[in-house]
Image (cartoon, rainbow, N blue to C red):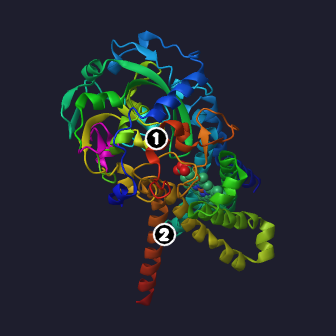
């Protein structure tokens, strides 16, 4: 199925500096009026993979009109199938001796400068981290608003310098059945794998998360480094990454391998394409309360301006 | 005689209390500020009552095979007398399941839309069966219908069990392990009941 993609959809050669993105960012900025109110992070929380880095809020990525999801809920209501399939399981089980520090990460494949180093060293090499507030929409029809810390993946891409053959980026998570109880079962082919096209990976929105709310990334949220792709369903934002490969063919991501009819490669947030068991037109707001009504789900989770151009001419019903 | 009556009354009160406890337990996550509850209360309670009703239903269905397998076990015989009451409480809990589902889904058009999915449809069919069973569970209804016909109608419970198995299995995201854990005891007991029946029959031949 994936082989067809290239026929139906020409990969834009370069999109990082595309003018439409630049322009939309400026209007975005204007509408915000540079307002940063509300979120001030205490530097005393900075530890783990945020050590010694100041984290300024990036004014381009503030969602002033939305309330942040409380820290307690972001770090308690987790999907992390390596540890548990319950929402409450990961918080308990990922903090029972699983070590996310020190952590080596390897970037390799069709690149000119492969690297393999400790996450903290990588952050230093990238030039530090910043803060961004993103919406997070889970495929299970719920959503959060999360202040992440980290750096744009595009910076890492520039660093490793992919060759012309690199068309996709494959992300691989850790494997440690001793600490991650679910990895002892074989109904999922571990380790967890995710993928993006190179142009998706190089988009300004695509982010490598190293923390949230100014603190180091909690284990249950994917310490010490994870992907954050806010216009795709949450499962695309792979946690606890150990390996990034630049490749020429589309990798088969874990959920697509498990249930190809329910979860695709792109997994863009799309209110018009239902999951076989529920509608994706609306979402529940985490922490919203008992009678909080559903909110309408936005195309590309509200990031259409930033990423819509990536999918011109793509049949999003077919490539869900 | 008087003493016996009091005992039965106590026992009945005891059973009522036991049946009400899962419902009261619903307030525990509210009072303890369980973050999973706070994240999405309607979803939490929807799932909670789905599981509670299903476990209770499986327990009710287990009573008759248990009685066949262990005829001398007194507690099962006494509980079995209140089987209909257990059955009615399954229905009450599934009404809660439905109410919290309606709150969770919230939007009428979406609820109608979802009726097309086999997942929701199996739940709705099971709900109707439970409704029929619960509404024919008074002494008056049993008398009106006649015991043998009543028994026949109540065999629908096994169809409901199959539908609920399907409903719960579909809802799982990865495999059907939880569903199998839920239903395994009932499956084993039914297997033993049939086994005992077959053995008895073959003994009677000789
Ligand atoms: C009235 C029609 C019904 C509707 C609309 C309905 C709907 C639902 C929904 C939306 C879920 C949650 C799925 C999820 O978490 O993604 C669910 C789960 C469940 N339902 Fe129902 N259901 C119905 C009837 C029943 C009945 C009759 C039973 C059994 C007596 C039942 C047992 C369950 C169970 C065991 C779960 C799984 C809970 C969990 O483990 O999280 N449902 N149902």
* Residue A295 in picture, x, y percent from top left: 65, 40
Q: Whereabouts is ligand 1, in terms of quadrant?
A: bottom right
Residue nearest the observer in this picture, A61 or B60: A61
Residue tagged by mark 1? A234
Visible residue check, residue B56: no
Visible residue check, residue A252: yes
* Residue A101 in picture, x, y percent from top left: 28, 24
Residue nearest the observer in this picture, B168 or A28: A28
Residue tagged by mark 2? B190
The boundaries of the magenta stretch are A165-185
* Residue A150 in picture, x, y percent from top left: 38, 24
Chain identifier of the residue bearing label 1 in the image: A
Quadrant, the N terminus of chain B: bottom right
Identify the secondary structure beneath mark 1.
helix
* Residue A87 in picture, x, y percent from top left: 48, 39
Chain identifier of the residue bearing label 2 in the image: B
């Amino acid at each position: 199925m994936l082989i067809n993609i290239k026929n139906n959809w020409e990969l834009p050669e370069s999109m990082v500096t595309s003018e439409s993105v630049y322009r939309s960012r400026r209007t975005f900025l204007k509408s915000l009026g540079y307002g940063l109110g509300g979120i001030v992070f205490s530097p005393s929380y900075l530890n783990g993979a945020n050590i010694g880095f100041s984290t300024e809020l990036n004014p381009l990525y503030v969602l002033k009109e939305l309330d942040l999801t409380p820290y307690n809920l972001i770090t308690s209501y987790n999907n992390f199938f390596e540890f548990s399939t319950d929402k409450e399981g990961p918080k308990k089980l990922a903090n029972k001796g699983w070590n996310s520090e020190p952590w080596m990460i390897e970037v390799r494949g069709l690149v000119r400068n492969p690297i393999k180093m400790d996450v903290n060293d990588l952050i230093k090499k990238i030039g530090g981290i910043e803060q961004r507030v993103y919406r997070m929409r889970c495929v299970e029809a719920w959503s959060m608003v999360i202040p992440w810390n980290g750096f744009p993946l595009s910076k890492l891409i520039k660093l490793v310098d992919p060759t012309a053959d690199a068309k996709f980026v494959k992300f691989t998570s850790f494997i440690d059945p001793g600490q991650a109880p679910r990895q002892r079962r074989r109904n999922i082919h571990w380790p967890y794998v995710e993928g993006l096209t190179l142009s998706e990976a190089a988009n300004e929105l695509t982010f490598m998360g190293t923390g949230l709310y100014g603190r180091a990334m909690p284990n249950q949220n994917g310490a010490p480094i994870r992907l954050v792709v806010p216009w795709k369903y949450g499962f695309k934002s792979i946690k606890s990454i150990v390996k990034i490969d630049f490749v020429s063919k589309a990798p088969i991501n874990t959920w697509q391998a498990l249930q190809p009819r329910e979860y695709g490669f792109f997994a863009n947030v799309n209110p018009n394409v239902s999951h076989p068991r529920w509608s994706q037109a609306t979402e529940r707001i985490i922490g919203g309360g008992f009678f909080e009504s559903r909110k309408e789900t936005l195309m590309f989770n509200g990031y259409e301006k930033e990423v819509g151009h990536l999918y011109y001419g793509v049949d999003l019903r077919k490539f869900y | 005689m008087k003493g016996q009556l009091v005992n039965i009354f106590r026992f009945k009160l005891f059973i009522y209390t036991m049946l009400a406890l899962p419902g009261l337990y619903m307030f525990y996550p509210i009072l303890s500020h369980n973050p999973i509850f706070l994240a999405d209360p309607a979803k939490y309670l929807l799932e909670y009552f789905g599981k509670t009703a299903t476990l209770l239903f499986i327990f009710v269905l287990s009573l008759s095979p248990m009685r066949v397998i262990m005829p001398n076990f007194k507690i099962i015989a006494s509980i079995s007398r209140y089987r209909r009451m257990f059955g009615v409480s399954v229905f009450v809990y599934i009404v809660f399941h439905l109410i919290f589902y309606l709150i969770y889904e919230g939007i009428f058009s979406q609820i109608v839309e979802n009726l097309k999915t086999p997942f929701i449809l199996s739940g709705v069919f099971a709900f109707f069966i439970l409704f029929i069973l619960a509404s024919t569970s008074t002494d008056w209804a049993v008398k009106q219908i006649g015991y043998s016909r009543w028994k026949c109608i109540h065999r629908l419970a096994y169809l409901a069990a199959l539908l609920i198995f399907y409903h719960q299995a579909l809802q799982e995201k990865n495999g059907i392990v939880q569903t199998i854990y839920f239903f395994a005891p009932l499956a084993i007991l039914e297997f033993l009941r049939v086994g005992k029946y077959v053995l008895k029959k073959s003994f009677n031949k000789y």
